[in-house]
Image (cartoon, rainbow, N blue to C red):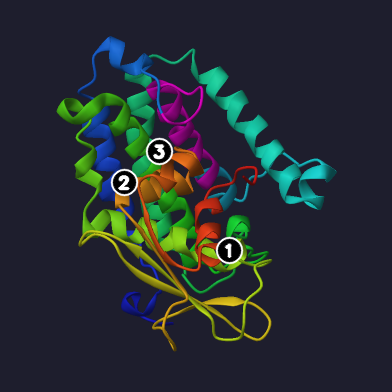
Amino acid sequence: MMTEQEIPIPVAHLFARLDTLLIDLLGSLDDEDWSKPTLAGAWTVKDIAAHLLDTNCRALAIQRDGYYDIKPPQAALESYSGLVEWLDSLNHEWVQAAKRLSPRVLVQLLEITGKETSAYYASTDPWVIAPFGVAWAGEEQSYQWMHLAREYTEKWHHQQQIREALGKSKGQPERLMTRELFYPNIATFMRGLPHTYRSVEAALETVVEIIIESEAGGTWYLQRGKTAWNLAPEASSSPSATVTLPPETAWKLFTRGISQAEAKQQIRMQGDETLGMPVLSMLSIMAKPR
């Protein structure tokens, strides 16, 4: 087995850290804080916390315990849009039921299940085939390390949505915008680039450069191969387009927190816009295409 350093995006050791920050934050909230609106559509702070509890419970029941009592309808098995609709309905059912839970109970359950989930994730082999492929990256099958990276982005971006909703004085959104915590999130999001560009025509070895600003970000190169676009460790030629995004814009854009129009006002684009613009359509969550 490869060492953790050789895993493309190692995150198993970060779940406990992320959960500790979440529990500390939620434990500091006033009654009115729980009902504040967020970037997650109609969900409030409490609704997002409930969804994060569901994420833990599903991981433990389905992945750790092998208990899967909910069968997806045929539509969810036949198309991406069908899968998204089904997952949305599951999420809605849970959040509605969780309205019966007090914030105190919710925090207690998050703390218990978070510890169990983190321990389970740390015990898994990163190179086995995961139970679910990362569909937004175009993967029908994924290695466990990629599955964990996807699960990490779920926990990261939903906690960040809570922090944004609570503001700088209480939510402290910068707490997650570090190299340690933000970089694995954005690096995983970038795994969706080849799938996003799958219908974009370009000459062989055309390169699109994507830069996420700040020391917590990085630079990614998307290169046209013979049959598909691929992420490359370095550019083989001068980029035909360069898209530069502030980190705060990037995570919100790729999770449908802001529109493409809003994002376009906050980014810099150089070179061929027809090759740069598809970046703005990327979604690195399970959601209907823009």
Please report whichever mark, 2 or 1, sits nearer to the chain's N-terminal start.
1
Q: Is residue 194 above or below residue 3?
A: above
For marks 2 and 3, give the one nearer the viewer.
2
Quarter of the picture containing the C terminus is top right
Q: Residues within 10 Å of mark 2 (few under 14, many from 20)?
A: some
Reply above or below: 259 against 29.
below
Inspect the image, locate mark 3, and give the three-letter code of the amino acid beneath it: His
Residue 54 coordinates in the image, percent (x, y): 50, 34
Look at discs 2 and 1 and give the one toward the viewer.
Answer: 2
Q: Tell whether 247 sits left or right of 149.
A: left
Mark 3 or mark 1, which is nearer the start of the sequence?
A: 1
Is residue 42 part of the magenta span, yes or no?
A: yes
Given residues 43 and 55, the one toward you in this image is 43
Q: Residues within 10 Å of mark 1 (few under 14, many from 20)?
A: some
Query: In the image, what residue type sits under mark 2?
Result: Glu
Q: Earlier in the sequence, mark 2 or mark 3?
A: 3
Q: Main secondary structure of the magenta part?
A: helix
Q: In the picture shown, does residue 48 fall above or below 99?
A: below
Q: Position of residue 258 (x, y in %)?
A: 45, 38
Of circles 1 and 3, the one toward us is: 3
Quadrant of the frame with the N terminus:
bottom left
Q: Residue at x 20, y 43 (%)?
A: 175
Quadrant of res 49: top left
Which residue carries the number 1 mark? 130
Q: On the image, numbered disc 3 is attached to which residue? A: 158
Residue designated by label 2:
248
Q: Residues within 10 Å of mark 3 (few under 14, many from 20)?
A: many
Which residues lie in the magenta part? 39-59
